[in-house]
């Protein structure tokens, strides 16, 4: 089968480049081979960064293409076999249908109070002149937000243990862990001290805690609860069937992991850029101030400059560098290449967002580009698209804006070191290549920049 051109180096070398330096590797290939190229990643995978081709793939990924689970097995050890991410076809369509309602845009107001309160709790601990790691702080906020959105007000030893175990498991992003995920033959339990053995034991405990929670709720149903788990337990498919316990457990794992790590990283980048570029910070503060004494979070959500900053942060270094794989179902022509059924295709979100023809001076952080023109969903696609478009998109958008506004309204912060920070692989997503430290300079008391929680 003739595939688009790509590097000729041995497959193992390409795999190692892909694991250790995915972004420079993709950039080198795009310079050399253009909008579409093939990497030998066992199997060969076609990378695409042309918006028309992305549109073709993502608008027909249940027709000429499919979005199967075969290539998402790297997520299986963490999320299980029943996660929306690791199933495909009809089962995937059903799982999405059951999962989507709690994530519809109109439900976001329900989560506003939680987001505001959790952020307030965490940032009220910051001390003047004391530095802190931005990513860790954002991770604490987003983990608590998703825990409370999923379980409702959630306190006590089970909640605490769950939060701690998930945080440890998600922070294990060493190259060894990535290699283990890509090479299932290495996933061997050599006892509690071995890397995989530790992972398995933690996962077993997390499953136990989630199963206990599900059982407790099955035994004491409370129809007045509106948290995500309650909605998922009440959801029914077209045949009137609900989710099984195993499905619920794996979907909880999916939402708790997909739902906080990504947003924490995106917030970290946004805070980095806002404080690295004084003109951006000034404009943003002006906009937030102009919203009045007690701005309604829905006005915060609609603020144009905040939206531009948020978008540019996800544009320049997208947390998810790729869409999930799509596979050719019936012969298609993509960017002039005839692809046969079975060909695996990945949308490179990273390369698309780096296109100079779409984003002039693409290496610069310029929120204004989002005010000057509109980008199509295939030119700007931090949440992917089509049959597997991010379920948490509206949630993440709302959450990030409310958290950013709350932090900027409450504190004057500064970067400890404003040197350059670049993206690097963090497990299966990307993040900053070094710790970003910030220091709190001044706290605003109830001032014009205070978000009104009662209006949420
Ligand atoms: C800034 C934050 C986030 C980013 C950048 C992000 C990005 C992505 C991307 C790129 C995909 C793949 C889409 C595709 O293949 O077309 C995805 C899928 C997914 N995301 Fe997110 N995400 C974020 C936050 C969240 C949140 C908050 C949740 C849930 C609470 C979530 C849940 C999911 C799920 C379940 C899928 C898989 C959907 C499927 O397979 O059908 N994500 N996300």
Image (cartoon, rainbow, N blue to C red):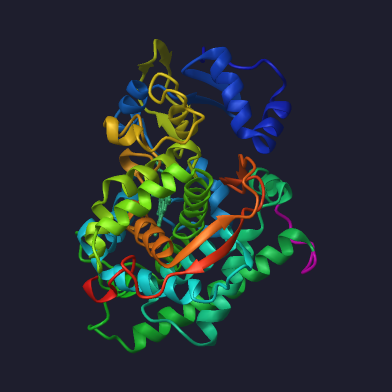
Read off the magenta span. 187-193
Task: Compare residues 291 and 54 and report the one nearer the observer.
Answer: 291
Indicate whether residue 190 is drawn in magenta.
Answer: yes
The spot of residue 235 in percent (x, y) is 25, 68
Quick check: can you spot residue 74?
yes
Task: Compare residues 257 and 333 and report the one nearer the observer.
Answer: 257
Quick check: can you spot residue 42?
no
The spot of residue 252 in percent (x, y) is 43, 66
For the point 29% across and 74% down, the residue is 453
The spot of residue 116 in percent (x, y) is 36, 70
Indicate whether residue 319 is drawn in magenta.
Answer: no
Q: Name the quadrant containing residue 232.
A: bottom left
Task: Compare residues 346 and 306 and report the one nearer the observer.
Answer: 306
Magenta span: chief secondary structure: loop
Quarter of the figure with the C terminus:
bottom left
The spot of residue 233 in percent (x, y) is 31, 73
Q: Name the quadrant containing residue 201.
A: bottom right
| Up-down relation of residue 361 to residue 98 (above or below) | above
93 displayed left or right of 7: left
For the point 28% across and 31% down, the residue is 372
Number of numbered markers: 0
């Amino acid at each position: 089968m003739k595939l688009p051109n790509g590097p000729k180096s041995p497959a193992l070398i390409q795999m190692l480049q892909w694991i250790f330096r995915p972004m420079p590797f993709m950039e080198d290939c795009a310079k050399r081979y253009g909008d579409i190229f093939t990497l030998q990643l066992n199997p060969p995978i076609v990378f695409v960064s042309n918006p028309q081709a992305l549109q073709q793939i993502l608008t027909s990924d249940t027709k000429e293409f499919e979005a199967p689970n075969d290539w998402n097995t790297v997520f299986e050890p963490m999320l299980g076999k029943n996660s929306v991410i690791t199933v495909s076809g009809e089962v995937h369509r059903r799982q999405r249908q059951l999962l989507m309602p709690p994530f519809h845009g109109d439900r976001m107001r329900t989560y506003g109070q939680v987001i505001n309160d959790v952020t307030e709790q965490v940032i009220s601990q910051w001390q003047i002149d004391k530095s802190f790691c931005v990513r860790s702080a954002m991770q604490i906020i987003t983990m608590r937000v998703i825990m409370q959105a999923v379980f409702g007000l959630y306190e006590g030893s089970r909640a605490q243990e769950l939060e701690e175990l998930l945080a440890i498991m998600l922070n294990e992003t060493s190259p060894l862990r990535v290699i283990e995920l890509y090479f299932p033959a290495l996933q061997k339990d050599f006892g509690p001290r071995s890397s995989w053995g530790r992972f398995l034991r933690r996962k077993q405990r997390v499953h136990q805690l989630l199963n206990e929670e599900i059982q407790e709720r099955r035994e004491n149903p409370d129809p007045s609860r509106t948290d995500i788990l309650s909605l998922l337990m009440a959801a029914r498919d077209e045949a009137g069937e609900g989710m099984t316990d195993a499905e619920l457990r794996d979907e909880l794992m999916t939402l708790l992991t997909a739902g906080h790590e990504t947003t924490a990283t995106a917030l970290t980048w946004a805070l980095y850029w806002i404080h690295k570029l004084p003109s951006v910070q000034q404009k943003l503060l002006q906009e937030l101030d102009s919203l009045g004494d007690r701005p309604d979070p829905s006005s915060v959500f609609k603020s144009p400059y905040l939206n531009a900053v948020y978008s540019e942060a996800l544009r320049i270094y997208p947390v998810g560098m790729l869409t999930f794989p799509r596979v050719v179902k019936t012969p298609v022509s993509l960017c002039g290449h005839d692809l046969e059924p079975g060909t695996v295709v990945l949308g490179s979100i990273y390369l698309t967002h780096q296109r100079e023809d779409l984003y002039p001076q693409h290496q610069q952080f310029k929120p204004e580009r989002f005010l000057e023109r509109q980008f199509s969903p295939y030119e700007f696609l931090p949440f992917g698209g089509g049959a597997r478009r991010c379920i948490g998109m509206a949630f993440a958008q709302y959450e990030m804006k409310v958290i950013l506004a709350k932090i900027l309204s409450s504190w004057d912060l500064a970067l400890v070191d404003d040197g350059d920070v670049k993206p690097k692989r963090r497990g299966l997503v990307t993040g900053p290549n070094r710790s970003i430290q910030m220091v709190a300079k001044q706290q605003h008391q109830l001032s014009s920049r205070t978000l009104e929680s009662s209006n949420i």
